[in-house]
Amino acid sequence: GESVGLHLPTLSVQEGDNSIINCAYSNSASDYFIWYKQESGKGPQFIIDIRSNMDKRQGQRVTVLLNKTVKHLSLQIAATQPGDSAVYFCAENPLGGFQKLVFGTGTRLLVSP
Amino acid sequence: DAGVTQSPTHLIKTRGQQVTLRCSPISGHKSVSWYQQVLGQGPQFIFQYYEKEERGRGNFPDRFSARQFPNYSSELNVNALLLGDSALYLCASSAGTGSYEQYFGPGTRLTVT
């Protein structure tokens, strides 16, 4: 079945470090992937997306890498700040015809000053 | 520009009751999707509506229904509430269906007692 998993439930880093959050997906037909940030009591906030015809995409302080060979997705956050502390979800869209994002359980990022 | 808005923010209902949740998408967006997020888990897809038509349905019972209005706002209805329906209900909007960015609202916290 469809599933999106995360390798680490909690990641603790120091302010200024680079963070890497990993995600494995199981549906090789998925053609679209998104990373979301969710702070306590709020809805998921869009961070960055990538389509299956790409292997890397960069945003402001964030980079998403896609390895279709091993069905792996990662989010890199440069110079992590305390405001980056949140739960991060990766999500895949396994069907191109409509949107049905499949989310994992999330990784909690804790940034210490 | 206003983001996705949802109402009410919080809601407390008793078992067996019915509830209606509301969502207004980002201006210009024609697609609305609903997700259920149980505490500690990632969001689970319930429905997608695009141009007032249901485009996708997740693995939820028939007690869950939704509709989209001509102005693209949407309602999610849940009948015969169960304790297990307690969750954060999220609405997401996007410009189209398929591989488009989805932006989430703040959610409605439903508690069933």
Image: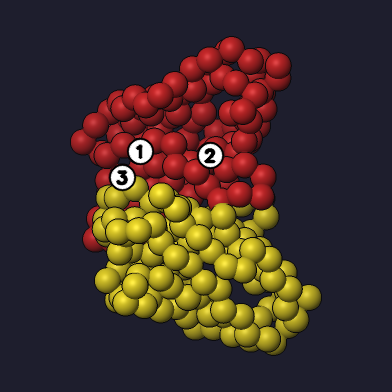
Q: Is residue B111 above or below residue B1?
A: below
User: Closer to the observer: label 3 or label 1?
Assistant: 1
Q: Amino acid at mark 3?
A: Tyr
Residue sitting at x 72%, y 78% = B13
Q: Amino acid at mark 1?
A: Asp
Q: Amino acid at mark 2?
A: Lys
Residue A107 in sight here:
yes
Q: Residues within 10 Å of mark 3 (few under 14, many from 20)?
A: many
For this rendering, which residue is in front, A47 or A88? A47
Q: Chain of mark 3?
A: A
CB under 8 Å between discs 3 and 1: yes
The residue at which mark 2 appears reads as A37
Sequence-wise, the earlier of marks 3 and 1 is 3
User: Closer to the observer: label 2 or label 3?
Assistant: 2
Sequence-wise, the earlier of marks 2 and 1 is 2
- The quarter of the picture where residue B68 lies is bottom left
Q: Chain of mark 1?
A: A
Expressed as whole percent of the image width and height from the top left, the position of residue A86 reads 62, 36
The residue at which mark 1 appears reads as A49
Specify the quadrant that holds the C terminus of chain B. Answer: bottom right
| Colour yellow, chain | B
For this rendering, which residue is in front, A110 or B109? B109
Q: Both on one chain, marks 3 and 1? A: yes
The residue at which mark 3 appears reads as A32
Q: How far separated are the C-alphas under marks 2 and 3?
A: 17 Å
Expressed as whole percent of the image width and height from the top left, the position of residue A63 reads 39, 24
Expressed as whole percent of the image width and height from the top left, the position of residue B12 reads 73, 73
Q: Both on one chain, marks 2 and 1? A: yes
Q: Secondary structure at mark 3?
A: strand
Of all residues shown, which one is farthest toward the front? Answer: B1
